[in-house]
Image (spheres, rainbow, N blue to C red):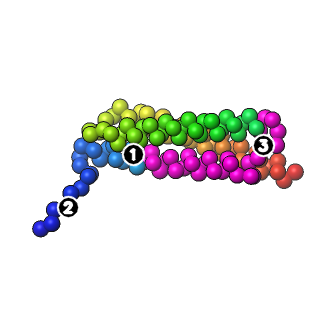
Amino acid sequence: MVHIKSSFTPTNIGNKISVTYLERNLKDVQQLGCKLNSYLCEPQTYGMFERIESLKNDLETLKRSEQEIISELKGLKKPTKAYDEIIKQQYSEFHTLQHGISEYIFYCEEHSHK
């Protein structure tokens, strides 16, 4: 009988799931950044320039925060409920930012056809 060593144990499965979720979310954050850097999103007015810069700054802040949380979770030996609220907050911030970027892109598309 061959014994396969698995890194998924009852003590660290919660952290691994959280890390996987955050890593996927981080990819989504990077994709949103690519959308904002698209030529289709070039600001046409000063107000649009301010908005896109704000969105880019928020994206960068969220990205750094998620990277820090991922590193911390990977370093933990035992699962911790303390990160549950932090991860929920990250999720909420991501969706708020995603909505803001969608609105900005819609605005850009609407005004580029005029």
Element on which disc 3 rests:
loop
Most foreground residue, 84 or 62: 62
For label 1, the residue is 19
Most foreground residue, 107 or 36: 36
Residue 96 makes an appearance in the image: no
Question: Residue sitting at 82 percent across and 39 percent down?
Answer: 45
Q: x, y percentage for residue 27?
A: 52, 50
Question: Where's the N terminus, which quadrant?
Answer: bottom left
For label 2, the residue is 4
Three-letter code for the amino acid on which mark 3 is drawn: Pro
Residue sticking out furthest to the right: 114
Residue 83 makes an appearance in the image: yes
Q: Quadrant of residue 61?
A: top right
Q: x, y percentage for residue 7?
A: 26, 52
The mark that comes first in sequence, 1 or 2, is 2
Element on which disc 1 rests:
helix
**Residue extent of the magenta highlight:** 21-48
Q: Any mark on residue 43, and which?
A: 3
Q: x, y percentage for residue 91?
A: 50, 40
Q: Are marks 1 and 2 in contact (CB under 8 Å)?
A: no
Q: Are marks 1 and 3 in contact (CB under 8 Å)?
A: no
Three-letter code for the amino acid on which mark 2 is drawn: Ile
- Gap between marks 3 and 2 measured at Cα: 55 Å
In magenta segment, residue 43 = yes
Q: Quadrant of residue 19?
A: top left
The mark that comes first in sequence, 3 or 2, is 2
